[in-house]
Amino acid sequence: MSLVRRLARAREAGILVMLVLFSLVVGLIEPRFLSGETVRIVLLAIPLIMVAAMGEMMVLLARHVDLSIGSILGFSAIAAGMVFRDHPEWPLFIGFAVAILSGAALGFVNGLIVTLFRLPSIIVTLGTLSLYRGLLFILSGSKQIDPNDIPEPIIRMAQTSPFGIPWIVIIAFAVALATWLFLTFTQVGRQIYAIGSNPGAAPLRGIRVVPVTILVFTLSGALAGLAGIIYAARFGYVNPGITGVGFEFTVIAAVVIGGVSINGGIGSVAGTMLGVLFLGAVQVALPILGVSGFWQNAIYGGIILIALVIDRTVRAGGIRGLLARGTA
Amino acid sequence: MLRNKWMLVAALGASLLTGAAYAADPVKIVYIPKNTGNPYFDSIIKGFEDGCKKLGCEFTTVAPATAEATSQIPFLTAQLQRGVDVVAISPNSPDALNQVFDRARSKGTIILSVNSDMPGNEDHRDAAILPVDFTKTGPSQVELLGSQIGYEGDIAILSATTDAPDQNVWIAAMKDTLEKDPKYAKMKLVTIAYGDDDPQKSTTEAEALLANYPNLRGIISPTTVGVAAAAQVVETAKKADKVKVVGLGTPNQMRRFIENGTVDAFQLWSPYNEGLLAAYFAVGVKNGTIKNEAGTVVEVPELGKVTIGDKSVLKTQADLTTFDKKNIGDFNF
């Protein structure tokens, strides 16, 4: 157990080193990057990814993957947006409830299909990625939720709160904290790690694999649904063909950069948060550096790959001593 | 003049007669937008629908979920098999559909490129219906921003993708206007950012513009996703009085920002009128009342006269429409 924990710590050390090095290098080229303004921009950019990443992390921990979160986010955002648009007299929390519950329902369906038919989750959620996107077109009649249909208080969530920090940032960190508490202090939370570490042995240890797996997908869906509200708050409108498209790739990249193993069982909330922060910093750094639009995609992808290679090297113990000791 | 009118009446009468003769078989028009769920194209569709209600044509619309180069092909072939007379399409690619178009036209189907043309591939379609005289887009946007910032200060452009053909032509025209017209000599274009028509990326790019250029006075974003993102960023950063946002947007997308004072004015044209003109043109050409050649005048009751230009290009309106606090209430698209 202590070995696993030390490995996990090494992984987080690796990503932390990368985050610091990256910020320093960018700051050296463009000192403006190390300003409070940049911190503000990064903090506004990450809540969307962070909330969904917590769900995706749990799915990966259980040795599954959820490719449908972008479509779930879109579906939930449209559903909540339609409530806001068609029933402006209803209290706002109903929109929240609709987003989270519809996301949970779609995630539940994912988990049900994966466990009931014993299908690989990558294939099931590839299917529901299209299915849910299609359903959201049908639900919305292909009509966008326009900015004046989103209530002012929702949009202000991305701008401020009584504490000075925008609500969406507070929500994101609260979700991370709750996930950490759940994984660390509940039996079910520990069982998720056990299932991912060794799915064959889990039932022998008395773990009910099917309900726990379904729960994990349901949580992932619910968090993608919550991300749908954050999307509406931050961008101020919801478009059926744009909202959440390709979102799964950003989230999975963040989670994997954060040291969560694609093979299940290994990973932590702190690592995932660092992965999200790193990706957010890269996304903000490229335009601040004035990198031309022609180069941005290539550089963005390259940085993700370099991050993964460094992380893998650190984990394999190659230069682990060097990096980990250097920061200890 | 009078004689022209009488000829028109005669032509209308003739078209009514032929219309009566073919009453059982109205002109079948399909419109294929770039993708579904785009409020801009919904407005073009509304124009087609209203036009067809008056003219008695049979109108349908189908669209792919994503605006990829080849995503329209299956929809197009299915409609051709159904036997439509006119295909109006806002092509996702200037040339990916050429072969399908050629086959359809050899069987008598009329192909109209709506909202954007297919540069270099004009031989593969019958005519293009454009929303506005696009050469005015660049200069008109520069003037709109200039008038709001006293024709002085740093400005930036937030565009769509680096290879977006329309935007690149407009941006070239903006640069040209800024360089050559002495009126804009004190406006300095500091950078061009690309938001890829993605809300997330457009937002990050707009935030970087504010961070990188503390003296920025204005942003021009000639794309509906970009201009909304820029407005949202300026509002969130509480810099609406310092940084002016102009661009091309739809009234419903921008209404909130106009009403709360974040944005003073933006521009566009009427996609609705574009659909209307396309419907009148399609039915006229199919029935033989409109000759598809340069110089022919097409008359649409709600619009007035539109003259067919070189390479069978029709421009729905000459100048861009400016939307501000005074008139935005009159528009709903």
Image: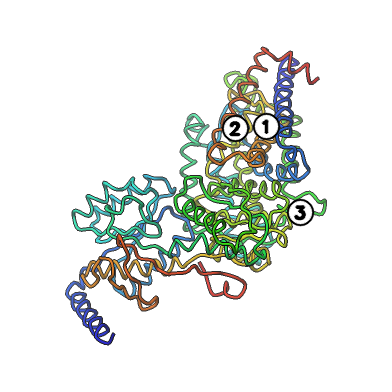
User: Residue B248 at x, y = what percent?
Assistant: 54, 60
Question: Which residue position is annotated with label 2?
Answer: A253
Which badge, 2 or 1, is on the more N-terminal residue? 2
Q: Residues within 10 Å of mark 2 (few under 14, many from 20)?
A: some
Q: What kind of residue is marked 1? A: Gly
Question: Which residue position is annotated with label 3?
Answer: A160
- Residue furthest out toward the left: B21
State the image quarter where residue A266 is shown. Answer: top right
Which element carries disc 2, helix, strand or loop?
Answer: helix
Seen from the viewer's position, the closer of residues B208 and B141 is B141
Which badge, 1 or 3, is on the more N-terminal residue? 3
Calculate the distance from the C-alpha at mark 3 to the C-alpha at mark 2.
Answer: 29 Å
Q: Residues within 10 Å of mark 1 (few under 14, many from 20)?
A: many
Calculate the distance from the C-alpha at mark 1 to the C-alpha at mark 3.
Answer: 25 Å
Q: What kind of residue is marked 2? A: Ala
Seen from the viewer's position, the closer of residues B14 and A118 is B14
Q: Is residue A228 left or right of residue A41?
A: left
State the image quarter where residue B152 is shown. Answer: bottom right
User: Is residue A94 depicted above or below B292 in this figure?
Assistant: above
Chain under callout 1: A
Which element carries disc 3, helix, strand or loop?
Answer: loop
Quadrant including the N terminus of chain A = top right
User: Residue B147 at x, y = what percent?
Assistant: 63, 67
Chain under callout 3: A
Asked if the residue under mark 1 is in contact with the one under mark 2, i.e. CB atoms within 8 Å, the reply is: yes
Question: Which residue position is annotated with label 1?
Answer: A275
Calculate the distance from the C-alpha at mark 2 to the C-alpha at mark 1.
Answer: 8 Å
Which element carries disc 1, helix, strand or loop?
Answer: helix
Q: Residue at x 53, y 46 (%)?
A: B196
